[in-house]
């Protein structure tokens, strides 16, 4: 069967009434959390992990993917109207979009962001569908040493791509790897790092750690910032429809942003913010109105927003085909897969094709839902910005606690939730990324298992890890992954900082 046949079968799965409902819930929740400053899709998916434990795996994963896409859409509303980017990938949108809103052109700014997100999401999802099978064919020839090299690449990726410091990323990763060692050794049956506590023999629950680090830790961090005064929300004045000139200036930026964002999102050392920075720099160079940049250029909203959403689909390429997360939300989605005993990778396409292709096809449906939800209901999303923060974050704490108790009714598990929540708070205070801890806990046992298999086959010869061409290439990419994000970020942020300095002058 070809890709189109699989995609059509996936559409039949995604179009089932319950799956459509899950997709609608996902995109609605995702848009809402994207609008609310300080709450991202990673936090929302983490909160829903214990709640969806008893649900259908396919429906839950479709909902998670909808949240991911919706969060990318919703973030533009906050950036444009509040000048508060919820995530690093929305910084550029805030730069130009808020200037447009202040000039009374918030409607066209929101429209070009929504339509650009739709165009990029549609093209990038089709790209995901057609690229994934080729990567799966390559990955099917992987043996233990190739899989171990892939895990090393994943570890390096999350260490260098998340946060501003590779050293801090590595520190976070090793915290996760240490937590992964807790429990019964699968090979020898010996207890490791359990300290005589029976509850630790089964290891650390990924769901508990994810909810604690992303929800509890983030909430405590926001609460510790104190009340900084009310933020000014720019009103949407006039029509949200774009003029003919706006369309003419936006459509090329949408396409360029898509083709910049998708491959960068799919790169092991990629990331949505890199694509948005490069898209912004590209639009500024190619624009016929360079004097408008810094004062509300519509291309400066259209291109980066398209790149942002294209990178979301790009992120799913390594996640689904190789089990390699390249964003915080992808790391939590990986935890969601494992919650149901599923391991993303080439075998998942062979053993659960309906689930995988249903998930991919649901992204196409989610894109149409998001376009319908975003433009007509922009007034509703703006009202979400008026929710008092104490109510909002108290609700998150309550929801996280009840969800954890519901999934695992244990006093010890509740204590672990609090302990890891405090750890997440301390890490946020000192600038340590959270995602590598979760990735280390998830992939650590898999990496250990593959390393032991490779060394057993070679009778302890360590050089076997480097003699395979595929393993050698993966390890080489891992080495480059330390350097590439630093160069790309320096280029992209240099452009944005120069623009910021020019706009302040």
Image: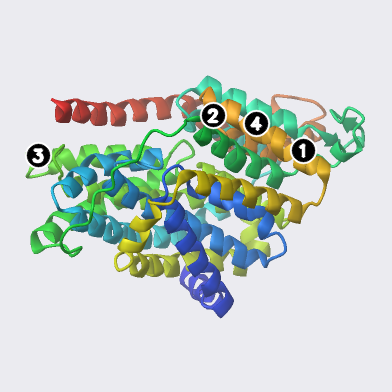
**From mark 2 to mark 1, how far is it between C-alphas?**
20 Å
Where residue 280 appears, as percent x and y from the top left, is 24, 40
First in sequence: mark 1 or mark 3?
A: 3
**From mark 1 to mark 3, how far is it between C-alphas?**
56 Å
| Viewer can see residue 247 | yes
Q: Is residue 402 left or right of residue 250?
A: right
Give the residue at mark 1.
415
Q: Nearer the viewer, residue 6 or 403?
A: 403
Q: Secondary structure at mark 2?
A: helix
Where residue 18 appears, as percent x and y from the top left, is 58, 76
First in sequence: mark 2 or mark 3?
A: 3
Residue in view at x 37 percent, y 55 percent: 73
Q: Secondary structure at mark 4?
A: helix
Residue in view at x 46 percent, y 35 percent: 269
Q: Nearer the viewer, residue 363 or 415?
A: 415
**From mark 4 to mark 2, how far is it between C-alphas?**
10 Å
Give the residue at mark 3.
290
Residue 445, picture quadrant: top right
Q: Is residue 245 left or right of residue 271?
A: left
Q: Nearer the viewer, residue 332 or 404?
A: 404
First in sequence: mark 3 or mark 4?
A: 3
């Amino acid at each position: 069967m070809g890709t189109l046949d699989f995609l059509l079968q996936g559409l039949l799965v995604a179009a089932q009434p319950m799956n459509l409902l899950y997709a609608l819930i996902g995109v609605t929740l995702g848009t809402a959390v994207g609008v609310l400053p300080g709450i991202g899709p990673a936090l929302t998916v983490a909160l829903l992990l214990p709640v969806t434990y008893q649900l259908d795996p396919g429906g839950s994963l479709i909902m998670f993917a909808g949240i991911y896409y919706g969060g990318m859409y919703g973030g533009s509303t906050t950036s444009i109207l509040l000048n508060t980017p919820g995530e690093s990938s929305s910084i550029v949108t805030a730069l130009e979009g808020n200037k447009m809103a202040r000039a009374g052109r918030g409607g066209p700014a929101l429209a070009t962001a929504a339509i650009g997100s739709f165009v990029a999401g549609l093209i990038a999802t089709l790209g995901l569908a057609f690229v994934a099978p080729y990567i799966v064919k390559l990955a099917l020839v992987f043996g233990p040493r190739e899989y171990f090299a892939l895990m090393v690449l994943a570890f390096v990726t999350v260490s260098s791509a998340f946060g501003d410091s590779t050293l801090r990323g590595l520190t976070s990763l090793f915290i996760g790897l240490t937590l992964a060692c807790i429990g019964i050794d699968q090979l020898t049956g010996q207890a490791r790092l359990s300290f005589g506590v029976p509850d630790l023999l089964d290891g650390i629950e990924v769901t508990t750690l994810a909810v604690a680090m992303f929800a509890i830790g983030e909430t405590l961090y926001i609460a510790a910032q104190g009340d900084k005064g009310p933020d000014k929300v720019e009103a949407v004045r006039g029509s949200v429809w774009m003029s003919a000139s706006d369309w003419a200036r936006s459509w090329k930026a949408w396409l360029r942003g898509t083709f910049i964002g998708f491959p960068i999102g799919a790169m092991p050392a990629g990331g949505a913010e890199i694509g948005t920075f490069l898209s912004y720099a590209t639009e500024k160079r190619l624009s016929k109105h360079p004097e408008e940049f810094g004062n509300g250029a519509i291309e400066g909203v259209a291109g980066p927003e398209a790149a942002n959403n294209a990178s979301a689909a790009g992120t799913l390429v390594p996640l689904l085909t190789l089990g390699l997360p390249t964003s915080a939300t992808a790391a939590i989605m990986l935890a969601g897969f494992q919650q149901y005993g599923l391991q993303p990778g080439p075998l998942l396409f062979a053993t659960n094709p309906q689930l995988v292709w249903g998930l991919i096809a649901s992204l196409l449906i989610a894109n149409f839902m998001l376009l319908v939800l975003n433009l007509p209901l922009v007034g509703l999303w703006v009202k979400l910005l008026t929710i008092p923060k104490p109510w909002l974050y108290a609700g998150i704490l309550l929801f996280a606690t009840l969800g954890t108790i519901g999934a695992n009714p244990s006093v010890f598990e509740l204590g672990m939730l609090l302990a890891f929540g405090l750890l997440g708070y301390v890490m946020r205070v000192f600038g340590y990324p959270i995602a590598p801890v979760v990735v280390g806990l998830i992939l650590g046992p898999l990496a250990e298992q593959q390393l032991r298999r490779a060394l057993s086959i070679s009778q302890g010869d360590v050089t076997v890890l480097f003699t395979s061409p595929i393993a050698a290439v993966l390890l080489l990419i891992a080495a480059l992954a330390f350097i590439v994000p630093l160069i790309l970020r320096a280029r992209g942020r240099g452009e944005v900082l120069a623009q910021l300095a020019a706009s302040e002058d």
